[in-house]
Amino acid sequence: MFQEKRLIPCALCGGSRFVKRFSCGDFGYVRCTGCGLVQINPQPVPAAVQNRYQEGHGADYLSYERANEAAFLRLQQLALYDAGFFDDARAYAALREPGGDRAPFTVLDIGCATGALLASLREQGRHVTGIEISPFQAEYARRERNLDIRTLPLEENRFPSGSFRAVLASHLIEHLNDPASLVREVYRILVPGGRFYVTTPNIAGFQARLLGKHWRSAIFDHLYLFSAKTLPALLRQNGFRVERVVTWGGLAAGLAPPRIKDWADRAAKKLNVGDVMIVRAKK
C-alpha cells in the first residue's frame, strides 16, 4: 500500500471539489464535482508509484503476466478487433506510394508487459516497439522475444515527433499519476492521422454500478477509474478526435451461472455498459 500521498487537482478539469464515491478499506475514491472523473485523491506520489512497478513488486507482476499471458493476449486481440485496429492496418498496407512501398506500419505498445501482443503484431508485418517500466518484464520480452523494449516512462524516451502510426495502451492509463501528460505525448509522437487505442476499466459499466466498492477494478493500483464519458473527454481535451468507444463484459466469471453470464455479457456489449472499454482516437 502506498504511504506518502498528496492532494492534487482533478486530472481532467483541474477542479478541486470532490465528493466521496466509495471507500475500499485503507483507501477510497472520490468523484470530481466538475467533470465526474473518479480518482484516488489524495494520491500517492509519482516516485512511489514508479517504484512499485520497477522494484517493489516487479517479479510478482512478471509471474502474474506469464501465468495469464495467453488469456490476456486473446482479450487484447479481441479488443483491437472491435476497435478496428486490424482494419486500419490492412487499409494502410493496401496503399502504395507510386514507385514503391509506403513507410512501415509502426506500433508502440505502452505497458507491454511480456511483449506477447507485440510479438504477434510483428509476425503480421508491423514494426513494433514497447515500453515496460518493470525491468523484470522488459528483460523477459527482450530475452525471450527479441523485442525493442524501453524501460523509461513514455515522456522520458523522447521519441521524435510522428514516430508511430498506432499507439496502444492496455490497462495502463488508470495507473498513472498524470494521464493527461501521457495523452499529450502520444499525440505528439503519432503521425498525422495516426490512432491511439486505449483500454481501461469502465466505471460507468453495469458491473461497477452493481458491485460498488467490491468491483474488481476498485484497487489501490488504479489511481483513476474512467468512464465512457471521462476518457473520451480527456482525449478530446488534448487534441484527439474520438472515433469509437466499445465496451464488453457483463459479469465476471464466478458471479453467475454460465448461461446467465453469457446473456449478461452479450447485453452489456450491445448496450455499451460493459466492464472494460477500448477507445479509438485519431490525431
Image: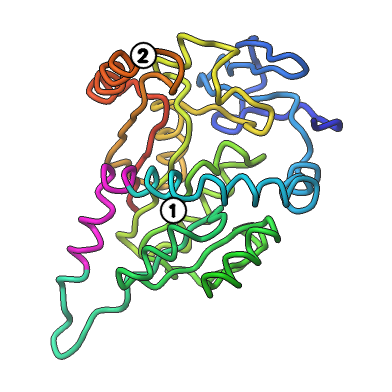
* Residue placed most toward the observer, 232 or 263: 263
Label 1 belongs to which residue?
A: 168
The image's mark for residue 65 is: none
Q: Nearer the viewer, residue 87 or 254?
A: 254
Is residue 23 toward the left or the right of residue 164 in the image?
right
Q: Amino acid at mark 2?
A: Pro
Q: Is residue 14 left or right of residue 94?
A: right
Q: CA distance from mark 1 to mark 2?
A: 33 Å
Mark 1 or 2: in front is 2
Q: Tell me: 253 left or right of 86.
A: right
Quadrant position of the N terminus in the picture? top right
- Magenta extent: 78-92
Q: Is residue 277 above or below residue 26?
A: below
Name the residue that disc number 2 marks. Answer: 257
> For the point 20% across and 63% down, which residue is it?
90
Q: Residue furthest right?
A: 4
Q: Position of residue 108 (x, y in %)?
A: 46, 62
Q: Residue at x 54, y 18 (%)?
A: 215
- Give the crowd class for mark 1: few <14, some 14-19, many >=20 residues within 10 Å: many
The chief SS type of the magenta part is helix
- Which residue occupies the foreground of this view, 240 or 2? 2
Q: Quadrant of residue 149?
A: bottom right
Of callouts 1 and 2, the N-terminal one: 1
Proximity of marks 1 and 2: CB atoms separated by less than 8 Å: no
Give the vertical position of 246 relative to 128 (above or below).
above
